[in-house]
Structures are given as C-alpha cells and as structure tokens.
Image: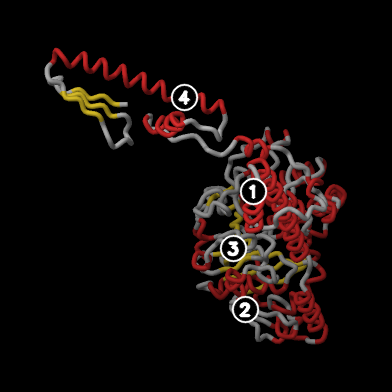
Amino acid sequence: MQLHISPSLRHVTVFPSKGFKEFIKVKVASRRVSYRMLFYFLLFFTFLLRFVFVLTAVDGIDGENKCSTIGCLGKKLGPRILGRRSESSVPEVIYQTLNEPLGKHELQGRFDIPQTLEEFMTEMKKGGYDAKTFAVKLREMVTLMEERTRMAKIQEYLYRHVASSSIPKQLHCLSLSLANEHTNNAAARLQLPSAELVPALVDNSYFHFVLASDNVLAASVVATSLVRNFLRPQKVVLHIITDRKTYYPMQAWFSLHSLSPAIVEVKALHHFDWFTKGKVPVLEAMEKDQKVRSHFRGGSSAIVANTTEKPKVIAAKLQALSPKYNSVMNHIRIHLPELFPSLNKVVFLDDDIVVQTDLSPLWDIEMNGKVNGAVETCTGEDKFVMSKKLKSYLNFSHPLIFKSFNPNECAWAYGMNIFDLEAWRKTNISNIYHYWVEQNIKSDLSLWQLGTLPPGLIAFHGHVHVIDPFWHMLGLGYQENTSFVDAESAGVVHYNGRAKPWLEIAFPQLRKLWTKYVDFSDKFIKSCHIRAS
C-alpha cells in the first residue's frame, strides 16, 4: 500500500498496490479537518483488511472446495490488494500421491495403465475420477513410460556398442583383398618410401606426421586429406604405424595409391628396434588391463542387466569394453620419443580425423618449452562437447585422485597433437603414464573407466601448450548437434565417439566431410561394396 499526502495537506491519495490501477483520493477542505478524516479512514481500512483475511483463513480450515461468499471474496481480493498472486490451486492430495514410491513390480502384468496422453485424458473424462485417482493413474503412466524409455535407451547404447566394436564386413573384405594383392602383385610390395627418399625420414626440415592405425580405409582418408590440403606436399613425411596383421594390406594400399610428392612410410611395430628389445611397459600394462577389465566388468550382458544404474552410466561401462581402449594403436603414442629418436617435433593424428586445411602453420607455434600442443575442451560455445574438465574423466571420489588433482581444471584433447620430442625427452612423462596405468589396474579400474586420455591428462599435466580450437573440432562421433557449416570451417574434424564415419551408425550430415576423401570408383572399394551412404 502507498500513501501520498500533498505538500498543502489538502489531498491524500491511497494506492493499494503497484499493480492496482484504481486509487482512492481524499480531498481535504481544511487542515483542521484533514487529520481526523485521515485517521478514521485508515482505521476503517485496516479493520476491513483484517476481516477479509480472517474469513479466508477460516474457509481454508473448513476445506478447499467449500467457500463462503465473503470468504471467497477475501481469497480473490486479498492477494490482489497486497500485490501477490494466489497460491497454487492444485489439491495437496495430488502432491502426496505423486510423492509416494511406486515399485516396479506393481506395474507388471497391468493392462489398465494408459499408454498415451490421449488415452489418459479420455479415461479421466469418462470416469469422473477424483483428485487422488487422477494422481494415481498419472503416476502409473509416467513411471511406465520412464521405464520403457530407460530400456529403449539402454538397448540403443548396446546396439551402438556392438556396431562400433565389430569390424564391418566391408573393411574386413578390404583387408583380405589387399593382403591377396600383396601376395600376387609385385607393385603392391613396393618399399615405402623408395630408397632415395629414406634420408627424409630423419630430416627435421620436413613436416613429420605420425598416424597409428590398423584400419586401412581410415588411414587412407587421413593421409589423402592431409596431403591434398597441404600447400607444400613435397615437404610432408607421413609415418604410418600399424600392427603385424595389417602391415601387408596397409603397404599394398599405399603402394598402389601413391600420394607423391608426399613421402609415406609404412612400418609395423615389430619393425622398430626399440619395440623388440626387452619388455615394453605399455604392452605389459595392456595385458593386465584386459584381464582385469573382463573380470571386473562381467561383459556387456552383465552391464545391461543392471536395473538400478542410469543409462548414461551403463553407456560409459559399455564404452569401456570397446576393443580400441585395449589396442596397442591407441597406447603407442606415449612412446613417440623412443620410436622416432632422430626427430625433434611431430604432429600425431588419430585415424578418425579429417584434415581440411594446410597444417604447416603448426610448426610455427611457439611451444614455450611445453611438450604437448593441444586444444582445451572446457571452453567454447558448444557446451555439450566443450565442457570437459578433469572431473569428466577421473574419479575424484578415489582418494588417490582427489589429493593429486583439481577436478575443475580444464581437460584437453587427443587426436591432433603437436609433440615437441626434444622437450619430451627431458621429462619423465612416459614413466608417469605407466605408473598411473598400473595404479588404475591395481585399483580394479576405479581411477578412470576408459581410454588413454585419462592417464594422458595425468602424465602431461603441466606440459600442455593450449592451441587455437580451429585446429581441432571434436565430438562428430557422439553427437549430431554440430552444424555442417561449422564443421566444414574447422582445420581438423575429429569423429571421436562410437559413430565412426566408416560405420553405418555414423551421422549422415557429418559423414560427408569424410566420404569426400574416399574414391568410391576404386576397384578395391567397389569390390567390397563400400558406399558413400
């Protein structure tokens, strides 16, 4: 309520509230009369307000559906006079009923629960139910829908897990065809690179890239996109590392599909002297990790059968079973200084990326003594993708993690990284990596669940130089919210996630950026029925 008295004391204006358009204006004839009139008016108005609210309270005690004439007037006018809205008119019984727990067994074998909102509304209109019955029916319907949604989500995650973990028959066909070509065709057994170009493999005046992959088709896209967009392809050296079983198909592909003037080297791990001498810590850790993981997780069937965990938790556990997380191709990057002892700087590329610009400016970035040039993943407009901090990957409920790191510290991305090997050799990064992998195995995988990024975040802690996000756009393999235009304008796009571009579960609008570097008229591609869509 607002009271306004004019300076001459001849006018008194009463505003009940800011939102009330009408007002009461009292004109005073003389000062001698004004005080008395004002006093009686205020006294009467105060009494009236109290009377209205007392009746309102009494009606509230009597019942929600009963209301006397004056009481109803008080309910309607009281809040308005004070400039407030009336409280919710939803009966309390509805809140009480909706808050009551509902066991899943109560819904089993029930056929009287509405399946849609339309059915629910039709039943309510025909039945003439009271508020409690309305709430009971609503609770049963919503609970049933939630359970069905949960199961559908889990099934989706399971199917995606199976699809992403299996080798598509087209890729299997490609490897077999190329292995056969390697056996029967001398042109598929060329030395890569040729003898006169071998010195370039250790020449630091070249731009050296490293790609570790056991997927011929994926490696071909990375290599083609890299060379095609490079302004000086004659200065590119691409070191392709693969495993023993994929070596011959990989050599056959790049022998028959030259990327000249770029220089391509194809080597299997067993060709590296360092890798064949003594024990390799990462291989020992992988063997232990595989045993613990299979015992601890219990397989995909046991994970899906859990009826208490949320779908996202189940999805994370399924993803932890992915073969790629126990692949030597995924772990080998931690041994780059030993694998390339003569090189000073390399750019490491994952096999699920596409290069869309000239990457030579990466060598002009001043690393300021840091080892790893990477894009941070906790800043940017896309909050779904660029919202990753250490707490997104590490288990801070574990005391070993809690006392060692800051959960809100920004994470960074693997996939396109500049590695200063000279600076790396002056650190103990590799040893720290192996130590924490071992600690995670000893703790039954309770420090983190999946991948090489979590131990990488730990090992490179304090050794990361942040580069512009233009150089590395993430998330094209686990969400489709990224627009095609934005992805097309990035320097490198990364299909990290399950929906790899060579799988049928890939997002069609984002897959186009990958398929543009596949020659679907190639005889090997056609014979294995690899198609653009």
Q: Is residue 269 above or below residue 528?
A: above
Label 1 crowd (10 A; few <14 / some 14-19 / many >=20):
few
Distance from disc 4 to disc 2, alpha carbons, whole Å, reads 90 Å
Crowd rating for badge 4 (residues with CA inside 10 Å; few <14, some 14–19, many 20+): some
Q: Earlier in the sequence, mark 4 or mark 1?
A: 4
**Which residue, given by chain and number where applicable, does mark 4 sit on?**
55
Figure quadrant of residue 509: bottom right
Residue on which disc 1 sits: 128
- Tell me which numbered mark, 4 or 2, is placed earlier along the sequence: 4
Give the secondary structure at mark 1.
Answer: loop
**How far apart are the alpha carbons under marks 1 and 3?**
45 Å
Amino acid type, label 3:
Glu
Of tags 3 and 2, the one toward the viewer is 3
How many other residues sit within 10 Å of disc 2, few (<14), some (14-19) or many (≥20)? some
Marks 4,2: beta carbons within 8 A: no
Say if mark 3 contacts mark 2, CB within 8 Å.
no
Q: Amino acid at mark 1?
A: Gly
- Ranked by sequence position, the earlier of labels 1 and 3 is 1
Which amino acid, by three-letter code, is at mark 2? Leu
Which mark, residue 259?
2
Q: Residue lying at the far front in this picture: please name it.
A: 69
Q: Position of residue 104 (x, y in %)?
A: 78, 46
> How many angstroms separate mark 4 from mark 1 (CA)?
31 Å
